[in-house]
Amino acid sequence: MADQKLSALTAREANVGDPFNDLLYYVVAAGATDADKQRKTTPWDILIGSARKMAWFKTDLITMDMPTYGNAGSSNQVDQNHQGVARIFGANTDDNGGFWGTYRGVSMQGGAVRTLFIVKTEGNLSISGDRYIVQMGLPAEGDSQLNQDGIYVKYSDNVNGGRWQLVTRSGGVESTADTGVTVQVDTWYRIQIDIAADASSASCIVNGSSPVTVNTNMYDQDATLNVGFRKTSGTNERGLVVDFVSYMKHLASAR
């Protein structure tokens, strides 16, 4: 029997019995022989096997199932491709808001990490008279404090020419990479950050752009999943729409 991809293998379902055990797939092991060449497994095996090797979290904000801080709440800025969105915002200096995970609940060690954020700018970008900063990724503290250690992407009009910027910061020393993507009004952005399994480098892709990479001043301590907003000047309300947040880690050792 030739080796095949799992997706090409025959599935068999029994008429009665335990659904965890009766729906069988044939998994072909390359290099195996005789009885070991073809092994049966179930959806339960696949699910648990994946869970033991992966740590993940996702929310599309349709149920507001991620903890918030500051000014964060539901939004009526829904369109057909973004069902269930939230908004983080501020009006006065130091107003802030965001979504965050367990405080320092992410270890940068022991496996490759990928985070994904889908967010939308509103009708007013950051300007000198009404300036704000957006940052999302894995900062140490996880809130909207400025200049945190961590690995994240940020935007403000006076940072990197108003383009999304990848930041790695450790011990107060910062390295950056220019994504080359200028932030526009009323625009959806899909921002992906990948961190190497040994925390030696981080890369970022914005809306399918070519990845940019940083490999200095890498933060390798515990961090907090976060998408945050902070107003730094002015008195007019500004905000960011958040549709989707996800985190995935490929564990180096199965749990």
Image (spheres, grey):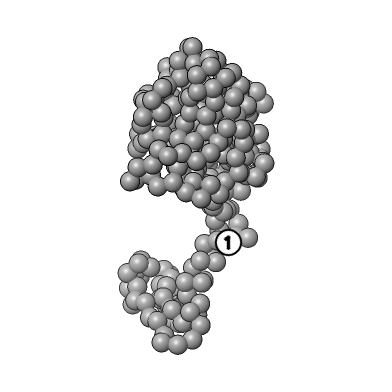
In this rendered view, identify the residue nearer to me: 70 or 209.
70
Q: Quadrant of the C terminus?
A: bottom right
Residue 187 visible, this angle:
yes
- Please identify the quarter of the rendering in which residue 105 is found: top right
In this rendered view, identify the residue nearer to me: 175 or 159.
159
In this rendered view, identify the residue nearer to me: 230 or 40.
230
Q: Secondary structure at mark 1?
A: helix
- In the rendered image, residue 201, in percent from the top left (x then y), is placed at 52, 35
Residue located farthest toward the front when viewing the structure as drawn: 76
- In the rendered image, residue 97, in percent from the top left (x then y), is placed at 57, 32
- Please identify the quarter of the rendering in which residue 31 is found: bottom left
Residue 192 visible, this angle:
no
Vertical side of 51 occupied by 93: above or below? above
Residue located farthest toward the bottom when viewing the structure as drawn: 16
Numbered circles on residues, count: 1
- Three-letter code, disc 1: Arg
Residue drawn at point x = 34 percent, y = 45 percent: 81
Q: Quadrant of the N terminus?
A: bottom left
- Please identify the quarter of the rendering in which residue 122 is found: top left
Within 10 Å of the Cα at label 1, are there few (<14), some (14-19), or many (20+) other Cα atoms?
some
Residue drawn at point x = 46 percent, y = 19 percent: 126
Q: Is residue 116 left or right of residue 185?
A: right
Residue drawn at point x = 60 percent, y = 44 percent: 67
Residue drawn at point x = 35 percent, y = 42 percent: 79
- In the rendered image, residue 254, in percent from the top left (x then y), is placed at 60, 60
In this rendered view, identify the residue nearer to me: 120 or 113.
120
| Residue that label 1 marks | 52
